[in-house]
């Protein structure tokens, strides 16, 4: 056995949540979520683990565990790769101790460095419970439980593309790309029948997939690994905040099955924008919506008391039209005194004189 040592520790702070990713040699990584109040305990835990790991030659596997199996893998459409060099991270079921399983949408992500490939996370039945093995980056794809994630991850290995001279070449036989920005592609359909597994089981073990690591996967386990990037950890964290992603709510059919990129558009299983989701661009739009709606809202409320004493029909009128109504009402009062002016204007009194001589009045008008 090879001595197991820590390769690196990444710390990401999201609001009051501290997420620590510890990269361990071999295929395992430890993701810990702490409240900021427990930082002292975290430091103590890291020191204790460092001491214990340095004294052992055994391979360490630390993971989140659950007493029930995760739901089946949902079937969904893969969005087109939006950026040249991005790699596909398949969607997976993550677990919250309080609310249970929730779906982390499949997403296109940037690798930590060129020539690295992504080994997906998987659930495995171990010691009477289902343990979670976090995904990782490395020069080769390792064992991911034999789970059929699709899009090049058919159960073992990866057929969705390969690196060549620092540039990634996409196999469009199994992955979807935006051809207006990505031109380094090829087609190899042999990977479909070589790696396809016809089931949607989401875990390895009794009742699920019973695959064992192949020699090339065992060799990949000994490579240098890099844990999920900060954006990948943030992506999972955001999914845990959307209740529509939890199996207890969606019954195994997540609202957002995939995303164009981290923070991008959430898509439903059919590839349409998931309007009910609060992830990505929908989350940003939801934050902006209250600010635009709140401005007219106070105006409507402030006018309602005054309108309640007026005629009900006036409520539907524009605020600017209301002052015009009182101005028009006294107008008849102003016009009423007009008859007092009419006597002065009343030239009709001259008409009786004209009646006595109608023939003379008419010629005068004709001369005018």
Image (cartoon, rainbow, N blue to C red):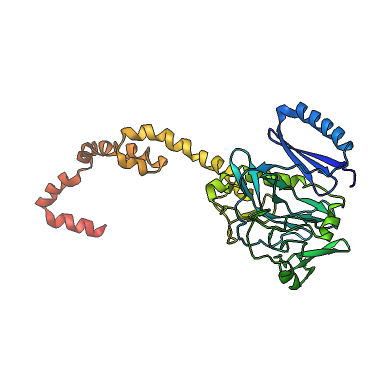
Query: Residue 90 vs residue 25: left or right?
Result: left
Of residue 127 and residue 230, the one placed in the foreground of this image is 127
Please give left or right for residue 339 compared with residue 150 in the image: left
Q: Which quadrant does the C terminus fall into?
A: bottom left
367, 126: nearer the viewer: 126
Residue 136: x and y, percent?
A: 78, 50
Count of marks overlaid on the render: 0
For the point 29% across and 36% down, which residue is it? 330
Q: Is residue 343 visible?
A: yes
Quadrant of residue 314 in the image? Answer: top left
Q: Quadrant of residue 273?
A: bottom right
Which residue is rendered at x = 71% and y = 71% of the image? 193
Give x and y (percent) for residue 47.
84, 31
Nearer the observer, 348 or 1: 1
Q: Residue at x 66, y 61 (%)?
A: 79
Residue 220's x, y, as percent?
Answer: 84, 56
Q: Is residue 301 above or below residue 267?
A: above
Instruction: Tell me if residue 114 can be seen.
Output: no
Task: Please tell me which residue lies in front, 153 or 273.
Answer: 153
Can you name the residue that lies furthest to the left here? 356
Residue drawn at point x = 46 percent, y = 36 percent: 299
Q: Position of residue 201 (x, y in %)?
A: 64, 57
């Amino acid at each position: 056995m090879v001595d197991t040592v820590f390769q690196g520790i990444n710390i990401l702070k999201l609001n009051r949540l501290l997420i620590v990713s510890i990269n361990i040699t071999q295929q395992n990584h430890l993701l810990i979520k702490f409240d900021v109040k427990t930082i002292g305990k975290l430091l103590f835990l890291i020191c204790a683990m460092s001491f214990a790991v340095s004294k052992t030659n055994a391979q360490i596997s630390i993971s989140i565990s659950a007493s029930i199996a995760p739901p089946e893998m949902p079937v969904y459409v893969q969005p087109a790769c939006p950026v040249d060099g991005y790699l596909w991270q398949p969607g997976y079921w993550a677990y919250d101790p309080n609310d249970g399983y929730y779906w982390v949408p499949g997403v296109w992500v940037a690798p930590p460095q060129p020539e690295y490939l992504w080994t997906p996370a998987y659930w495995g039945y171990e010691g009477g419970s289902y343990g979670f093995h976090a995904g990782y980056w490395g020069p080769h794809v390792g064992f991911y439980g034999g789970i059929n994630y699709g899009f090049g991850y058919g159960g073992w290995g990866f057929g969705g593309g390969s690196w060549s001279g620092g540039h990634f070449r996409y196999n469009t036989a199994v992955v979807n790309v935006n051809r207006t920005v990505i031109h380094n592609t090829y087609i190899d359909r042999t990977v479909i029948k070589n790696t396809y597994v016809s089931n949607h089981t989401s875990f390895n073990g009794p009742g699920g997939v019973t695959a064992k690591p192949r020699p090339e996967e065992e060799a990949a386990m000994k490579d240098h690994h890099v844990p999920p990037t900060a954006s990948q950890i943030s992506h999972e964290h955001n999914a845990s905040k959307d209740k529509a992603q939890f199996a207890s709510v969606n019954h195994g059919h997540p609202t957002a099955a995939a995303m164009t990129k981290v923070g991008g558009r959430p898509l439903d299983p059919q590839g349409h924008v998931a309007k009910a989701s609060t992830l990505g661009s929908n989350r940003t739009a939801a934050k902006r919506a209250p600010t635009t709606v709140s401005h007219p809202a106070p105006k409507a409320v402030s006018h309602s008391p005054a309108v309640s004493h007026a005629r009900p029909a006036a409520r539907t009128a524009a605020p600017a039209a209301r002052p015009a109504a009182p101005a028009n009402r006294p107008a008849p009062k102003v016009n009423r005194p007009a008859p007092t002016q009419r006597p002065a204007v009343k030239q009709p009194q001259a008409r009786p004189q004209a009646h006595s001589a109608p023939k003379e009045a008419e010629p005068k008008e004709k001369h005018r």
